Image (cartoon, rainbow, N blue to C red):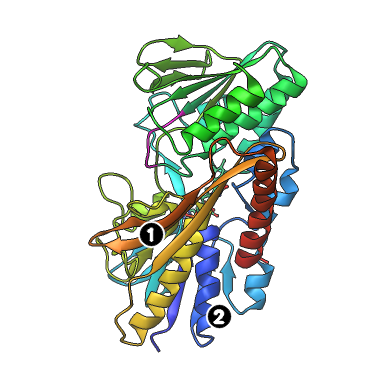
Amino acid sequence: SAGRIIVVGGGFGGAACARALKRTDAKLQVTLIEPNQLFTACPFSNEVIAGLRDIEVQHFGYDRLAAEDITVVAQAATRIEPQQRSVTTADGVTLGYDRLVLSPGIDFHAEALPGYDDAASEKMPHAWKAGAQTLLLRKQLEAMAEGGTVAIAIPANPSRCPPAPYERASLIAHYLKTKKPRSKVLVLDAKDNFSQQRLFEQAWKELYGDMIERISLSQGGRVTSVDPATRTIITEFGNYTPDVANVIPPQRAGRIAEIAGAADHTGWCPIDPVTFESKLVPNIHVIGDACLGGGIPKSAAAASAQAKACASAIIGLLAGRTPEAPRLTGVCYNTVAPGYGFSLAGNYQSRGDIFAEVEGGTTSPVDAPRELRAREAAEAERWFQTITADTFG
Ligand code: FAD
């Protein structure tokens, strides 16, 4: 039969795709390859860093997927042979597929930020993959003396969740205001403009006064290298030695995408926006942060929407049908303090080779009453409950 599907990566894209495949066609043989027994969700991990949430509520397992007859393999995929249509895992087992879905998330570009490697991330945590890194950054904040400076280095786009660094700056400011009010947050930014900027800047002024200082790209904010031995961040115009250095490096698709031959010179994976099939390797589909999604920001909401559209395209392709262009929707919440949130909702459709944003998107108003901010903060929490139940629960 032509119904063997392997999904690599059990995050927001991969787990949702495996589930959608099996729920739509129970006869498919669906295998999910993911090395971690417990997935740690990034959305709301900024709250963990700020001491507002326990990491345990970010953890999700794969029991429900296994109970739905998805074969869960707790290994990392290490080799992919597109000609043989096979995936090999770290324990040396090789599995064959008819269609392969890759949703490996991100990895970091070692060459793009000189000095920043795995050892450096133990001193200057990125916390851009949730788990041990999240807790390390929290610990460093807790250990910092009153009056200290926390620097956050933000890369250019495309990167995972473009507004999340500014949410992080906000929640760290909340923590400092509460616990060490003479401290500062220094944002070193490789961008001039960012998503929902007016809303963030208004909230910063209102809630945190001048606690957050941002140096934009034009002001020399782009980080060009780091020296972990002295905890120094080097930018185009100066050197900084903060007390806590949260360095979010430039990113690319998870390494296994490159091993499969699905990543191009940008480090990301070009895809057909109708089927999510790779433009570089046949029978391999790429979803989530790893794919070049055009106008779609890299988010859990987008990964989940792409996962379902990809599952339906694969089922169509296996049945010999021509899949229809999907319309994807996604909403992204930002929380800048407990009970203070805002959002951005977008609609996306394939246009030629990429996804483009189409009409119908909405953003929270600037100058809204606090009740609306409180309502949106509560909606953000419900969004998290819903998407994680939909993916893992
Ligand atoms: P992931 O969810 O990262 O899953 C990738 C999985 O692949 C991982 O489990 C990994 O272990 C596995 N994997 C990697 N390589 C292999 C391999 N070789 N073999 C097997 N498995 C492998 N998004 C929102 O929508 N809303 C938010 O509020 C939000 N907040 C965020 C806050 C922060 C601080 C951050 C960092 C991100 C946030 N995001 C948010 C973004 C969101 O987390 C990602 O966009 C989303 O997780 C992408 O899903 P994915 O499936 O592509 O990757």
Label for residue 23? 2
- Secondary structure of the residue carrying tag 2 is helix
Confirm whether the magenta stretch covers residue 43: no
* Quadrant of the drawing holding the N terminus: bottom left
* Quadrant of the drawing holding the C terminus: bottom right
Nearest the eye: 391 or 218:
218
Relative image position of residue 188 (x, y in whole percent): 46, 22
Asked whether residue 305 is in view, the answer is yes
Identify the image quadrant of residue 291: bottom left
| Magenta-tinted stretch | 154-158
Q: Is residue 367 left or right of residue 379?
A: left
Identify the image quadrant of residue 285: bottom left
Query: Which amino acid type corresponds to the residue marked 2 in the rendered image?
Result: Arg
Identify the image quadrant of residue 136: top right
Nearest the eye: 376 or 130:
376
Using a 10 Å C-alpha cutoff, classify the residue at mark 2 as few (fewer than 14 neighbours), some (14 to 19) or many (20 or more).
some
Using a 10 Å C-alpha cutoff, classify the residue at mark 1 as few (fewer than 14 neighbours), some (14 to 19) or many (20 or more).
many
Q: Up-down: is 247 above or below 354?
A: above
Query: Which amino acid type corresponds to the residue marked 1 in the rendered image?
Result: Tyr
Relative image position of residue 346 (x, y in whole percent): 45, 55
- Secondary structure of the residue carrying tag 1 is strand
Confirm whether the magenta stretch covers residue 157: yes
Relative image position of residue 280 (x, y in whole percent): 24, 60
Task: State the residue at coordinates (38%, 70%).
Answer: 326
Relative image position of residue 242 (x, y in whole percent): 56, 14
Q: Which residue is mark 1?
A: 348
| Cβ of mark 1 under 8 A from ligand 1 | no
Nearest the eye: 243 or 328:
328
